[in-house]
Amino acid sequence: MTTDGTNAAPRGSWMWPGMVFVLLGLSCTLVVTTVFLAHRNGGAIIEANYYEKGLQWDEHKAELAKSEATGWSHAVQISRDGEGEGTSWDVLVRLVDAAGETVDDASVMLSVYHVGAPRDVRAVGLSAEGRGGYRGTLEGFAAGVWSYEIDARGAGDAMLIAKGGAHAAGG
């Protein structure tokens, strides 16, 4: 009881229960923010047919070893075809064999995705244009960093399987 005969609570007695609710609110806000940021770009990349790829891992490693033994190398150039959003991108892949000669008789497939949209993987067959160059067009990608995989196969056992990254400058 207080000095005036009432049962009033002392000043500031609401502060500690209020702090519990404030901390719970902050915790919930952090969880919601974390979930939002984790799913903003589509979440984690899940490899398509990962089980089948796992079963064929030994064959894949043998192909990679054969590719390295071939000694082919590559260079990738990306340039914008037009102006504005949603324009197409010109992709040029140059192939050189172990002797430094250009590779003109290969079948080249390029799989590419923008690192900001890892689920949007696109594959394009590249056309030979001579002097080791293979050209194709990609539509609708944003400027920035792209990841790619090249699968180039020539006469006989000659091949190149390579992964890498390239920067596509906008504007």
Image (cartoon, rainbow, N blue to C red):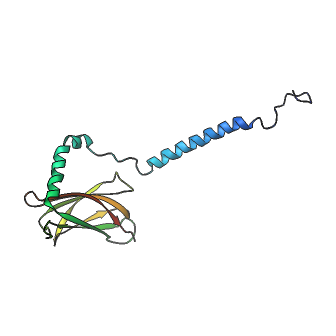
Give the farthest residue toward the left: 156
Q: Position of residue 48 (x, y in %)?
A: 28, 45
Q: Position of residue 130 (x, y in %)?
A: 15, 72
Q: Which quarter of the picture shows residue 8?
A: top right
Q: In the image, is 169 to the left or to the right of 12?
A: left
Q: In the image, is 106 to the left or to the right of 116?
A: left
Residue occupying the point 16% across, 62% down:
71
Q: How many marks?
A: 0
Q: Can residue 141 be spotted in the picture?
A: no
Give the farthest residue toward the right: 4
Residue occupying the point 38% across, 47% down:
44
Q: Position of residue 38 (x, y in %)?
A: 45, 47
The N terminus lies in quadrant: top right
Q: Can residue 65 be spotted in the picture?
A: yes
Classify 54 as above or below 121. above
Residue occupying the point 16% across, 73% down:
131
Q: In the image, is 131 to the left or to the right of 45?
A: left
Give whichever of 89, 152 is nearer the camera.
152
Classify 87 as above or below 16. below
